Amino acid sequence: MRDYELEILEHYDIEVRSTHKIRGAFFCDTNEGTMVLKETRVSDKRAPFMYKMLCKLEKEGYPNVDLPVATEEGSFISTSRDGTRYMLKRWFYGRECDVRKQQDVLAAVENLAVLHQKMRWTESEDGEVPMRGRHLREEFLSHNRELKKVRSFMRNKVNKGNFEYLFLKHFEQMFQYAVQALRRLETSDYDLLYQKSIGGGYLVHGDYNYHNVLILGNSGADAMATTNFEHARLDVQVQDLYYFLRKVMEKHKWDTELGRRILESYHAVRKLEEAEREYLVLKLLYPEKFWKIASAYYHSNKAWIPEKNVEKLRLTIAQSEEKLRFLDAVF
């Protein structure tokens, strides 16, 4: 560790025995167990909400969360002399969920359903109000405007490369999926589901992927740990299920049998309502990955496009047909 990172640890009432760095995080062996020191973008105002939410999860019977550790001054954020902001959190010995193993995937889905049963926020909790997720109509319209903006930019670009030609060639087809999703949204029960979720204080993890699920090798409630709740907010809870499902399906070429098992595993723990299933269809129908790649392109240095970005775009377009077949078969 650099000297100023060691200085950060001096702000905490713990004894650090050793440290090692993995993927930009500093793992610390302390007298109070394993902890991790990571750079954070969490605001000073939001950090206490994270802490209280995770404490509440513990009280609800979900013990394995990466609870932030307060400094001796009572803050959950420490700033180094170079201005970098850090958060120290409790950590666990385990391995990441292996998306190639069906057993891990299904266990992670059941874990998510258990989390959703316990993740609620009530107004009585110190008057703090968590962030709320964006309404799906607003999200779709915003993405559609940006897609059109990217198309306009590319059309007017003199020196087009493989990325631009590929995007423009398939734009109309991909944009039609976006239009279909928006039309279907207008006739769905999403509005009621959204209002119920926000009004009922239902929270989402906000970034539930296999990197944030640890297999601990224990049994029962101690079998898994869930980490990195920085994006937790009020929202439709199956947003987490959509995100996890999409990530897994992209790696499994939209395997319908695995998709069914994922939904069944979740439903066995926390019942999926019809409006929630419709939400999953809406989100899966929308070409989110296509938009995400286009948005990253538009906000980057467009003079040079790495070949891997061209491949990402090509794969996303190729998988769109597989995704439609998946939707027809599973829903």
Image (cartoon, rainbow, N blue to C red):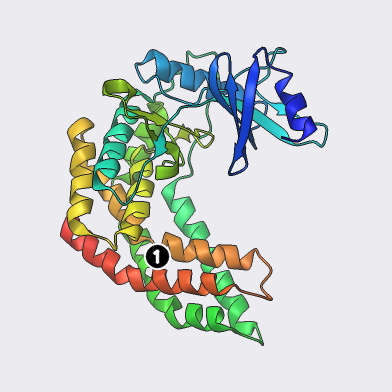
**Count of labels in the image:** 1
From the top left corner, tell me how far across and down residue 258 is, in percent. Answer: 21, 52
Residue 95 visible to the viewer = yes
From the top left corner, tell me how far across and down residue 18 is, in percent. Answer: 63, 25
Mark 1: secondary structure:
helix
- Classify 10 Å Cα crowding around label 1: few (below 14), some (14-19), many (20 and above): many
Q: In this picture, is 95 found above or below 328?
A: above
- Residue under circle 1? 178
Q: Quadrant of residue 58?
A: top left
Residue under the point 66% across and 87% down: 158
Q: Nearer the viewer, residue 133 or 164?
A: 164
The quarter of the picture where the C terminus appears is: bottom left
Residue 185 visible to the viewer = no
The reply, left or right, for residue 127 in relation to residue 1 is left
From the top left corner, tell me how far across and down residue 298 is, in percent. Answer: 62, 67
Q: Residue furthest right?
A: 81
Residue under the point 28% across and 54% down: 281
Q: In this picture, is 262 found above or below 112?
A: below
Residue under the point 18% across and 50% down: 260
The reply, left or right, for residue 139 in relation to residue 192 is right
Name the kind of residue labelled 1 in the image.
Ala
Q: Nearer the viewer, residue 200 or 5?
A: 5
Q: Quadrant of residue 219?
A: top left
Q: In this picture, is 153 found above or below 205?
A: below
The reply, left or right, for residue 318 in relation to residue 122 is left
From the top left corner, tell me how far across and down residue 265 is, in percent. Answer: 20, 39
The reply, left or right, for residue 15 in relation to residue 325 is right
Q: Nearer the viewer, residue 238 or 30?
A: 30
Q: Residue furthest front?
A: 18
The quarter of the picture where the N terminus appears is: top right
